[in-house]
Amino acid sequence: MRYSINIPNFGDFADARNVARVAVAAEEAGWDGLFVWDHVVHDKRMRAGQPFGDPWLLLTAAALATTRIRLGTLVTPVARRRPEQLARQVATLDGLSGGRVVFGAGLGGPIGDEFGSFGEPTDPVLLAARLDEGLALLARYWTGESVSHNGIHYRVDDVTLLPATVQQPRPPIWIGGFWPARPPMRRAARWDGAVPLFETARHGQIPPVDQARDLISYLRRHRGDGPFEIVLGGQTTSHEQVAPLAELGATWWDERFPMSGDDFHRLTPVLRRIEQGPPAA
């Protein structure tokens, strides 16, 4: 199992210098990855008055300050991005970091605040269709080969985006979603990894073993052969909390503060947890 730190792109972490500090501390303490949220306003009522940072600029600061840890978003709502611009951002970061990017993608939310606030569609079925078509385009763009596409939501006429990503044929794509909803996990099984949240174990809460078992069994039935990452997360105090999930087949543990307080977007408590090291045996 590998271990990552998860931080939002608001509060103290709207400042790229703080994100760089977190990345350096994580690398020095033996963590394997740093993942940043991708929100514009998140929950407008709860986040009123808080600063936000662009996740790709925050991750650029982290990449420049480190040499080893994996870096990425958990998760980017592809449906509110232009795929060609997003492809450029990811490829630039992958080159800068020497091929350390993980691309986390999902539907995104809260949909009303993150999409509806800007006049964007809020139909989750439509957003899911844009997500799937956008992911397919991103995978083609990152090869550095010519792309032509005439789809329902996007059109491309003979475009080659260079440079290609360092990782070929593309960076790993991990898909987020809420279990027990099946469609996001079927989507994840078509790519390289699943980053589930659980309806009964929200952000920062360790998922129940029986539900994790059901999820992993479902993913294996739909995935088939080949390497695949299963990323579970929550707040831990010991390895014993993670060990049963590793035995089930989880390959990453993503350390996340609960959202019940303010610690999850404050630099000092996050650094304190990082310096304690990952919950490894």
Image (spheres, grey):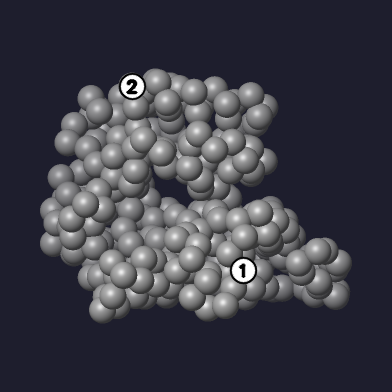
Residue for badge 2:
244
Q: Is residue 147 left or right of residue 108?
A: right
Residue at 42% in and 42% down = 197
Residue at the image position 58 percent from the left and 50 percent from the top: 173
The quarter of the picture where residue 147 lies is: bottom right
Q: Is disc 2 placed on a helix, strand or loop?
A: helix
Q: Nearer the viewer, residue 68 or 140?
A: 140
Compared across the picture, whether 32 is left or right of 163 comes to: left
Mark identifier at residue 37: none
Front residue of 23/55: it is 55
Q: In this view of the protein, can residue 63 be seen by the observer? A: no
Which residue corresponds to the image point at 82% horizontal and 64% vertical from the top-left?
151
Question: Residue type at mark 1?
Answer: Pro
- The amino acid on which the numbered mark 2 sits, given as a three-letter code, is Pro
Query: How would you rate the neighbour count of disc 2 (Cα within 10 Å): few for under 14, some for 14-19, many for 20 or more?
Result: some
Say what secondary structure mark 1 lies in.
Answer: loop
Q: Position of residue 245 (x, y in %)?
A: 37, 26
Dot label at residue 121: 1
Q: Quadrant of residue 46?
A: bottom left
Question: Do we see residue 244 in this rendering?
Answer: yes
Q: Which residue shows up at 70% across the image and 56% down it?
A: 129
Label 1: how many Cα within 10 Å (few below 14, some 14–19, many 20+): some
CA–CA distance in space, label 2 to label 1: 41 Å
Vertical arrangement, residue 211 with respect to residue 130, above or below: above
The answer to which of marks 2 and 1 sits earlier in the sequence is 1
Q: Nearer the viewer, residue 101 or 256?
A: 256
Pick the quarter of the image with the N terminus.
top left
In the image: residue 238, left or right of residue 165: left
**Residue 161 lies in what quarter of the image?**
bottom right
